[in-house]
Image (tube, rainbow, N blue to C red):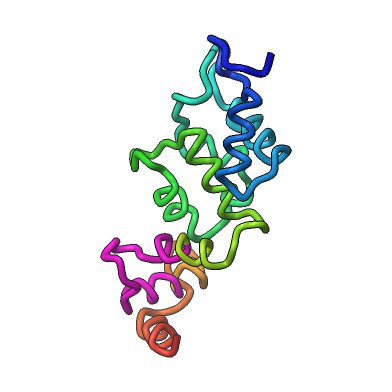
Amino acid sequence: MGSSSSRESRITREMLEEYAQLTYLNKAEILHVAKLFKSLLPRGTEELQHQRIPVEEILKVVPQLRYNPFRDSILCVFSTDNNGTMSFDDLIDLFSVMSENCPGDVKAAWAFKIFDFDEDNQLSLNDLIKVVEKLTGLKNNEPRIDRKSSKFIAQVV
C-alpha cells in the first residue's frame, strides 16, 4: 500500500521515513513541503522526485524568503543545479536547515555558504560589507548606507 508505484506524485511511506531520518523535519513538515512543491507542478505531472521548479515560483509558496535580503543567495546555495530552479530535495534541505530542530552548527555551516558571496570558502571583508549592505537595504535603488560606513561596520564585526 505505501510502497512505490508508477505515480510518484505522492510521497510513499518509505520516502517519508527516509526524509524523516535524513532531515531535521518531522513527517507532518515533510508532507507540508511536498504539498507546497506539488502545488507548483503543472497539472497532470505524475512525478515529484525528478521535477525542478523555477525559484520565482518557489517564492510564491515560501513567503518567508520573499522579503529576505539574502533571498538570492539562499536560493542559489540550496539549488543543487545552480540554474535558477529547485528540486523537491532542494526544498526539503532548505526547510530542514530552517527548522527549529536543526542544530546550530549545521545552521552556521549553511549561513557561511550563504554569506560567502564570492564563493572563495572564506568570509572576506568584501563579503561582510555585502552582508551589511543587504541588512540595511536599499532606498530608491541605492544602498541606505555608504560603502565607507559598511566597511567600517564589517571591520568591527
Q: Which percent across, then down, holds residue 150?
A: 41, 81
**Is 76 covered by the magenta stretch?**
no
Q: What stretch is highlighted in magenta?
A: 111-132
Picture layout, residue 144 above or below residue 69 = below
Q: Is residue 108 left or right of residue 34?
A: left
Picture layout, residue 46 above or below residue 145 = above
**Is 115 covered by the magenta stretch?**
yes
Picture layout, residue 65 above or below residue 81 = below
Q: Which percent across, then down, holds residue 97?
A: 56, 54
Instruction: Answer with the quarter of the image where residue 152 lies.
Output: bottom left
**How many numbered discs, if any?**
0
Q: Depth check: give the residue in front, 142 or 62.
A: 62
Instruction: Answer with the quarter of the image where residue 67 lies.
Output: bottom right
The residue sitting at 34% across, 63% down in the picture is 117
Look at the image and tell me in which quarter the C terminus lies. bottom left
Q: Which percent across, then down, holds residue 102?
A: 61, 58
The residue sitting at 63% across, 32% down in the picture is 16
The residue sitting at 51% across, 61% down in the picture is 106
Q: Which percent across, then down, holds residue 44?
A: 56, 10
Look at the image and tell me in which quarter the N terminus lies. top right
Picture layout, residue 103 above or below residue 77 = below
Q: Depth check: give the residue in front, 23 or 59.
A: 23
| Residue that sits furthest to the right in the current view | 28
The residue sitting at 35% across, 71% down in the picture is 127
